Image: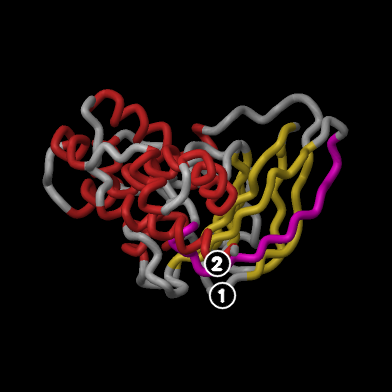
Amino acid sequence: MYDVIERAVTRVIESMHENHGEQLTIDDMARTAMFSKFHFSRVFQRVTGLSPGRFLSAVRVREAKRLLASTSLSITHISHQVGYSSVGTFSSRFTQSVGLSPSRYRQVMSITAQDLTDGGNPVPTWPTVTLHGTVTSPLPDRPIFAGIFPRPILEGRPASFTLIRRPGPYVMRNVPEGHWYLIAQSVAESREDAIHYPPGGDAALCIARQGPIAIGPEGGSQRADIRLKPMSLLDPPVLLALRDPLSSWSAGADAGADER
C-alpha cells in the first residue's frame, strides 16, 4: 500500500515541476494522485513532511533560483514564470527561503558560512544544548552542512549549524530549547549545478532529515547521528543558498570548527 501512496505523491511532485507556473490547486493535485482531496493532503504530508501547497512553493523558489543563475530574464519575468502574480510577494518569499534577495542571489549565488554566523540568531544567554554525533555519507570526501530548522525543509537561517570537511564526528553548539529538525546536505564534486535541478537519481545531492528533535531547557549535550542518502524527488527542495559552503568550504581547522 505504501508503494501505491509513494507513486501517487511522486506523480503530483512531477506535475509540480512541470507546471510550476500554473495555479495548481489541491483539487488538481488530488486528481493527479487519484485520491480524495482530504486523503491526499494527509498522505502527501506524511510522505514528504510538508503540505502540498508548501512543497509547491518550494519547487517554485528552486526554479526561480535556477532561472536567476542561468538566464538574464528580469526578476519580474521570473516571478511570473514561477507562478507569482506579485513581484513583492515573490521577492519576500525568495529572500525568506534562500537567505538572499533575488538580485543579490543573481550576483553571488551563495550565502557564506560567515553570512550565516553574522546574520543568524544571537547566541542565547539561557542554557542551550550541544548536539553531537557522527555523520555518514555516500560522498566520502565532500564538505557537509548540518543545521537545525523549525520545519523539515532546508530554508531560511538555521538556529544553529556546523560545517565539516568530510563525514565523521560533528559538534553543533548553542542549540536552543524547542522542537527542531536536523537537516544536512552534501554535494558531489563538480556537480554544484545539481543544486538547481530536481534530484537525478544519483548521489550528486545527498541529504539527511530527522526530527522533530526535542531540546529541553536543562542544557547539556545530546547525541544525534546523521546518515545522508541520495536525495529523491520526494525530499523537499533545498532552498537556502549553500552552493559555496557545499562546493568549496575547506577551512584549515578541524572538523566542526565553524559550528555556530
- Quadrant of the rendered structure where residue 123 is? top right
Label 1 close to label 2 by CB (< 8 Å): no
Camera-side residue of 161 and 150 = 150
Q: Residues within 10 Å of mark 1 (few under 14, many from 20)?
A: some
Q: Amino acid at mark 1?
A: Pro
33 vs 87, nearest the viewer:
33
Range covered by the magenta-colored residues: 219-234
- Please provide percent x and percent y for residue 178: 72, 33
| Residue 209 located left or right of residue 237 | right
- Residue visible at 53% across and 59% down? 5
In this picture, residue 229 sits left or right of residue 65: right
Residue 194 lies in what quarter of the image? bottom left
Q: Nearer the viewer, mark 1 or mark 2?
A: 2
SS under mark 1: loop
Tag 1 residue:
138
The answer to whether residue 208 is left or right of residue 212 is left
Q: Residue at x 36, y 60 (%)?
A: 198
Tell me if residue 68 can be seen. yes
Q: Quadrant of the N terminus?
A: bottom right
Above or below residue 95? Residue 209 is below
User: How many labels, in total?
Assistant: 2
Q: Residue sitting at 60 percent across and 36 percent down?
A: 150
Q: Residue sitting at 21 percent across and 28 percent down? A: 85
Residue 3, disc: 2
Query: Element under label 2?
Result: helix
> Split into 4 quadrants, where in the image is the C terminus?
top right
| Residue 60 among magenta residues | no
Mark 2 burial class by Cα count in 10 Å: few <14, some 14-19, many 20+: few
